[in-house]
Amino acid sequence: MHVKKPKVFLSWRFPDPGPQLVMEHCETQVWEGQAPIERTQFLSVLADVDGVLVSNATEQLDREAIDAAPRLRCISNFGVGYDNVDVPYATSRRIAVCNTPGVLTETTADHAFALLLAAARRIPEGIIHVKEDRWRGWNPWLLVGREVNGATLGIVGLGAIGTAVARRARGFGMSVLYWSRAPKPHEESETGAVYSSLQFLLQSSDFVCITVALTPETRGLIGAREFALMKPAAILVNVARGPIVDRSALYDALHDGTISGAALDVTDPEPLRGTDLLLTLPNLLIVPHTGSATDRTRSRMSELAARNLTAALCGERPLHIVNPEVLQN
């Protein structure tokens, strides 16, 4: 007897092998655009699908979107974060919400350290200096940066990525402080990180790296008060989510010299327009949300997101599910 395949929508042409895996099990529609699908078109597509594979950076599965999808049974995120989904509402509708933790941890930690080093040693400024033909020879005051070796790194949120960043810090002889909702003895023994209050961390750190998840409690966590606590020579690195940092307070802190610099993989909003005032700051380094952007990691994310989706739609337990209670009878 012919069994009808579930119908799914992929919001991007994700890297292989994810799309092929989905197509083996599902009737599949793929958005082929080079920009994110428009909201109205996305809501229209949701009307008759059983599952979606979406980017957590571009598609919002809020109450409106979930209500537009009466058949929806699984939201599979391409990414570890799931702040783009109204999880409680999805759970009330018995919709599985899945993500891709683990596979992007080391790559994102590499990226965090790349941003830290680039900001500390003023690498982007040096590149511009040479390309604009301003290099006139060696100068003892030219583009003097910050010492990384032996400095203190404060990590805001010692989850998987924060722990991986702490491991890298040990290789640079850094002292590591961390703030999290609760002490993490296992991670402390692995990395040598020391638990502290957020206030002490900000006051004591030469570099502050944000790796905490975006939640209602962490939205706007770093604002004017927190910047005022930091050292004038401190550098902020954010590889988590843009709204964790108050953008107006960030601009003021960098413009007024409250802190020395910042390096961001994420912004609020995303993407920033080319006319945004933040882009006028010479002590701010911004890259376009590329923390997991290596060929191997993106391929592994795609495969895991696809396997999560097909498992949920075929009545099996996904490898990574945010709300496992929906699987209970």
Image: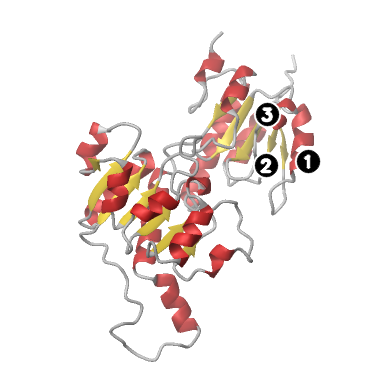
Q: Residue at x 34, y 66 (%)?
A: 120
Can you give x and y, in whole percent of width and height, for residue 259 in the image? 38, 62
Discs 3/2, front: 3
Choose top left, top right, bottom left or bottom right for residue 139.
bottom left
Can you give x and y, in whole percent of width and height, for residue 17 in the image? 57, 42
The amino acid beneath tag 2 is Ser
Task: Determine crowd level at label 2: few under 14, some 14-19, many 20+ residues with C-alpha closer than 10 A.
Answer: many
Report whether residue 164 is seen: no
Give the residue at the far bottom of this rendering: 136
Q: Name the disc covering residue 286, or none.
A: none
Choose top left, top right, bottom left or bottom right for residue 192.
top left
Secondary element at tag 1: helix
Report whether residue 235 is seen: yes
Depth check: give the residue in front, 96 or 119: 119
Q: Which label's residue is closer to the chain start, 1 or 2?
A: 2
Secondary element at tag 3: helix
Depth check: give the residue in front, 235 or 310: 235
Q: Name the disc covering residue 11, or none.
A: 2
Q: Are marks 3 and 2 in contact (CB under 8 Å)?
A: no
Distance from disc 1 to disc 3, alpha carbons, whole Å, reads: 14 Å
Q: Are marks 1 and 3 in contact (CB under 8 Å)?
A: no
Q: Which residue lies under the disc numbered 3?
A: 63
Q: Which residue lies under the disc numbered 1?
A: 40
Distance from disc 1 to disc 2, alpha carbons, whole Å, reads: 13 Å
The amino acid beneath tag 3 is Arg
Q: Is residue 68 above or below residue 107?
A: above
Can you give x and y, in whole percent of width and height, for residue 3 in the image? 72, 18
Distance from disc 3 to disc 2, alpha carbons, whole Å, reads: 18 Å
Q: Residue at x 37, y 40 (%)?
A: 157
- Which quarter of the figure is the N terminus placed in? top right
The amino acid beneath tag 1 is Thr
